[in-house]
Image: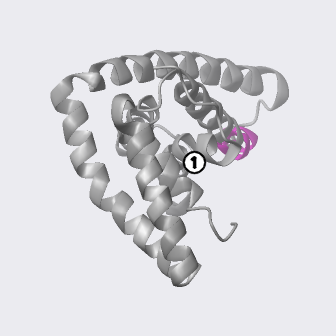
Amino acid sequence: MRRNSPPAFACWLLESVIPVPYREAMLGDLIEEYTLRAESASPLAASRWFWSQAFRSVPSMVWSSLRSGDWLISMSTAMGVYIVMQIVEHAANLAISKLVAPQPTTEVLLAPVVFLTATSISGCIAARIRRGATTFLALMVMITVAVLIYLKACTIPVPWWYEFGFLTLGPLSVLLTPAVFGVPKPTC
């Protein structure tokens, strides 16, 4: 991180929730204030301030988005990406189970790779289409994994951390991959 650049993930988080008409002005003001704080105090103190502003702003921005109806477009986009992700993931798992690894043990070892790849790519696609869709997509992934864990969909006994990994890393890969790889901003 450069001295005068705010935390990238905090910026991405704010970009995801700030309404488009206000996004440039609000982020510009926050980044300007961050730069002044980083020059006069320490970069760590400026980063803490920026994160606190991000965490304070997210709930009110999400609420504003819900009131304006923007959430419906984001949720519809996320649902479309989720359906395509499930089809691709199912096809990949079917190919692995029939062609590559017919043993259930090998399938259990390859399942996290397929799952995390699918969720990461889906997160990038959703972010490219519409910024707010990644939040809904992450929520859908988390709910699906929680239901599958509850229903004990895995026929082979696995340790608790295996299921917990799916529950945490799936939604995180949806949210973090677009931020890490710098997916271009959508036009909407």
Residue at the outermost left position = 67
In this rendering, the answer to whether 150 lies above or below 186 is below
Residue at left offset 52%, top offset 20%: 187
| Amino acid tagged 1 | Leu
Nearer to the camera, 171 or 182: 182
Residue at left offset 15%, top offset 30%: 67
State the count of labels. 1
Q: Quadrant of residue 162?
A: bottom right
Nearer to the camera, 100 or 169: 169
> Disc 1 on helix, strand or loop?
helix
> On the rendered structure, is 169 left or right of 141?
right
| Residue density around tag 1, few if under 14, some if 14–19, many if 20 or more, within 10 Å | some
> On the rendered structure, is 4 left or right of 64?
right
Quarter of the image where the C terminus is located: top left
The location of residue 37, given as percent across then percent down, is: 48, 75
| Residue 10 falls within the magenta-colored stretch | no
From where the camera sits, is residue 145 visible?
A: no
The location of residue 132, given as percent across then percent down, is: 41, 32
Residue at left offset 54%, top offset 24%: 186
Residue at the outermost right position = 100
Residue at left offset 55%, top offset 51%: 169
Q: Quadrant of residue 25?
A: top left
Q: Quadrant of residue 105?
A: top right
The location of residue 69, given as percent across then percent down, is: 22, 22
Q: Which residue is mark 1?
A: 176
Quarter of the image where the N terminus is located: bottom right
The location of residue 150, given as percent across then percent down, is: 35, 44
Please give the range of residues in magenta.
105-112
